[in-house]
Each structure stands twice: as structure tokens, then as C-alpha cells.
Amino acid sequence: MNRLKRMARRRENRAFRVRRRVRGTAERPRITIHRTNMHIYAQMIDDEGGRTVCEASSVSLKLPYGGNVEAAKKVGEELGRKAKDQNVGAAGLDRGACRYHGRVKALADAVREAGVKF
């Protein structure tokens, strides 16, 4: 197996290890985070109902550059506000294959400050 395939498989396995523990329900949806070098995306998913409860991203907020911690905080604040509008008080964090630091941590902290518990 070549190096790139091995790296991709390891990344998938890390994401599946996290997702195995976090399941989204209507009362406690799963917050998924996807980051790229230029933007950050987050959404709350109800796995039982198979629907997205709410979403926020640096693209939808029309931020000039969404690849930094400040943009992640703004996206987290927006996601938290939308979650409170949908009467979501608790959620589970699905960080995927990303480590919990930097932009992921900033987004999660901003959602917590908006009133959503993990």
C-alpha cells in the first residue's frame, strides 16, 4: 500500500473512532466540524431523524479568510445562536480526524459560550 493511501486510511480510522462514540439525536445532535486551509464548516446533525438541524461556516458568514482562530470563533457563535433558536441545549462534538486544539477548540468554546452544553 502506498504512503498516501495509508495516510488516508489512518485519517478515516481516527474519524470513525470518534464517530463510534458520538451519535446524534433530536435532543442532543452531533456537531461535525470540517476544516480546510481557507474555511471552516460546522453543522448539527440528528442521526436518528437523518437531518441537519443547523449549520454555519466561514463561507456563509462571508468572512474574507476563514482559516484562522478568529473566524472559527465567529462560526461557533453563529452555530450556537442558531442552535438556541432551534431549542437545542446539548450536543455531542464530532471533531472527526482533527485534534482538539486551535480552530476546532475555538469553535467548540464559542458554541459553549452561546449556551450549548457538551
Image: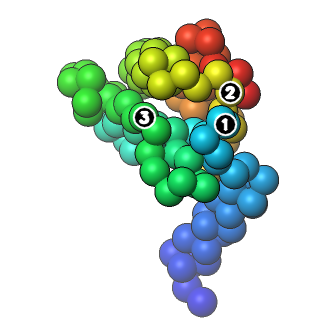
Which amino acid type is shown beneath numbered disc 1?
Arg
Q: Where residue 29 sits in the image (x, y, percent)? A: 61, 40
Q: Is residue 21 left or right of residue 68?
A: right
Instruction: Give the residue at mark 3.
Output: 54
Q: Quadrant of the N terminus?
A: bottom right
* Residue drawn at point x = 68 percent, y = 56 percent: 19
Q: Where residue 93 sits in the image (x, y, percent)? A: 66, 38
| SS of the residue under disc 3 | strand
Q: CA distance from mark 1 to mark 2?
A: 5 Å
Q: Is residue 9 left or right of residue 37?
A: right
* Residue drawn at point x = 21 percent, y = 24 percent: 62
When asked about the image quadrant of residue 102, the answer is top right
Which amino acid type is shown beneath numbered disc 2?
Ala
Q: In terms of depth relative to the viewer, which is nearer, 5 or 74?
A: 74
Mark 3 or 2, nearer chain start? 3
When asked about the image quadrant of residue 41, the answer is top left
Mark 3 or 1, nearer chain start? 1
Q: Residue furthest right?
A: 21
Q: Is residue 25 left or right of residue 69?
A: right
Callout 1–callout 2 Cβ contact below 8 Å = yes
